[in-house]
């Protein structure tokens, strides 16, 4: 038994000397930059997997790797051979099984920073028009909530939703409370799908959205909520969900679901998420106009 513990301790000692002590002795500026970049990458991976089923995959891989190290340290040849082959084949299996998660991660890497967000209102619209669009949305959602009419509304931001827009029926209409209510009327042919809003206009209706695979979602929530969560996981879109059973209004953003909104709180939420970047861009444009006018005046 003592010899087994000695082997384990020697393996741990060699590991620390080779992979921790020796690299620290020769560390330089390039190594520090490398560590910082790696930290950002690992932080991004952590943020991506913490609310998804990929966290279970990570725990499973950690367990397999630990068993493999123990098998090598104790010279368990059969165990080492089995786990070694599993790791080789497992990489391919992971790429196949978790293709949706990997695709979502790569899409989020390519997203434009939040300062460049184009929300439901085009940059050329003034504040009054933006407020009117949000009012129309909140009015429609409030009415459907009162009448317990199920609804699923997606507001496109930086991640383009062309493939989901193509799955529905083109609309291309101004945002209107009456139109939104009619689209989700329970006898309407498009009421089961999602309405997608792009650049301040209702772009399409009856759209099919990807379902979330998150096992942590409340089992009492139905397909409409799971579709809204799935859309928010795969893009930076804002998804408004009205429950057909209870009339409860929910908002899904970045894989997180918040519930129990009313007209006032929903309007505050949409203003907060959609208006900040527009004001920032507007200030920049206003500053440019002032500079141009000063130049003209000086001339």
Image: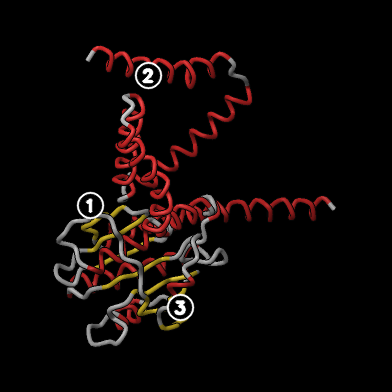
Residue found at the far front of this picture? 77
**Residue assigned mark 3:** 166
Q: Which residue is mark 2?
A: 12
Q: Is residue 112 left or right of residue 149?
A: right
Choose between 163 and 76: the one closer to the eye: 76
Answer with mark 2 or mark 3, whichever residue precedes in sequence. Answer: 2
Gap in angstroms between the C-alphas marked 1 and 3 = 30 Å
User: Which of marks 2 and 1 precedes in the sequence?
Assistant: 2
In this rendering, the answer to whether 261 lies above or below 81 is below
What residue lies at 32% left-to-right and 58% top-to-bottom?
252
Q: Nearer the viewer, residue 21 or 137?
A: 21
Residue 65 in the image: above or below residue 282? above
Mark 2 vs mark 3: give the one in front: 2
The single residue placed furthest to the right in the displayed view is 299
The residue that appears at 20% across and 68% down in the rendered structure is 243
Secondary-structure class at tag 1: loop
Where in the figure is residue 25, as x and y percent of width and height? Answer: 56, 13
Q: Position of residue 155 (x, y in %)?
A: 41, 66
Q: Tell me which residue sits at (41%, 83%) in the image.
A: 169
Q: Residues within 10 Å of mark 2 (few under 14, many from 20)?
A: few
Mark closest to the chain's N terminus, 1 or 3 = 3
Q: Between tags 1 and 2, which lies in front? A: 2
Q: Report, in whole angstroms, how far the alpha carbon at label 1 lies from the one at label 2.
A: 37 Å
Q: Quadrant of residue 273?
A: bottom left
As helix, strand or loop, the secondary structure at mark 3 comes to: loop
Determine whether, in the image, residue 36 is placed left or right of residue 15. Answer: right
- Residue marked by disc 1: 216
For mark 3, does the 10 Å Cα neighbourhood hold few (<14), some (14 to 19), or many (20 or more) residues?
some
């Amino acid at each position: 038994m003592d010899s087994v513990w000695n082997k384990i301790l020697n393996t741990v000692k060699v590991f620390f000397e080779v992979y921790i002590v020796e690299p620290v002795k020769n560390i330089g500026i390039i190594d520090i930059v490398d560590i910082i970049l790696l930290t950002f990458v690992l932080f991004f991976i952590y943020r991506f997997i913490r609310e998804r089923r990929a966290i279970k995959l990570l725990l499973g891989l950690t367990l397999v790797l630990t068993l493999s190290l123990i098998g090598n340290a104790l010279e368990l040849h059969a165990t080492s051979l089995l786990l070694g082959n599993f790791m080789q084949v497992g990489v391919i299996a992971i790429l196949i099984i978790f293709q949706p998660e990997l695709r979502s991660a790569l899409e989020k890497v390519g997203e434009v920073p939040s300062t460049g967000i184009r929300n439901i209102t085009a940059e050329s619209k003034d504040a009054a028009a933006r407020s009117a669009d949000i009012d129309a949305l909140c009015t429609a959602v409030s009415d459907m909530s009162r009448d317990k009419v199920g609804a699923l509304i997606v507001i496109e931001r930086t991640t383009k939703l062309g493939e989901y827009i193509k799955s529905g029926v083109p609309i291309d209409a101004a945002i209107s409370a009456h139109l939104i209510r009619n689209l989700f009327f329970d006898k309407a042919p498009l009421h089961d799908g999602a309405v997608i809003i792009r650049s301040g206009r209702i772009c399409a209706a009856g759209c099919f959205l990807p379902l979330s695979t998150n096992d942590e979602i409340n089992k009492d929530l139905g397909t409409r909520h799971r579709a809204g969560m799935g859309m928010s996981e795969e893009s930076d879109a804002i998804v408004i969900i009205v429950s057909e059973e209870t009339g409860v209004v929910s908002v899904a953003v970045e894989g997180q679901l918040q519930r129990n909104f009313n007209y006032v709180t929903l309007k505050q939420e949409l203003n907060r998420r959609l208006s900040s970047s527009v004001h920032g861009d507007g200030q920049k444009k206003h500053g440019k106009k002032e500079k141009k006018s000063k130049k003209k005046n000086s001339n």
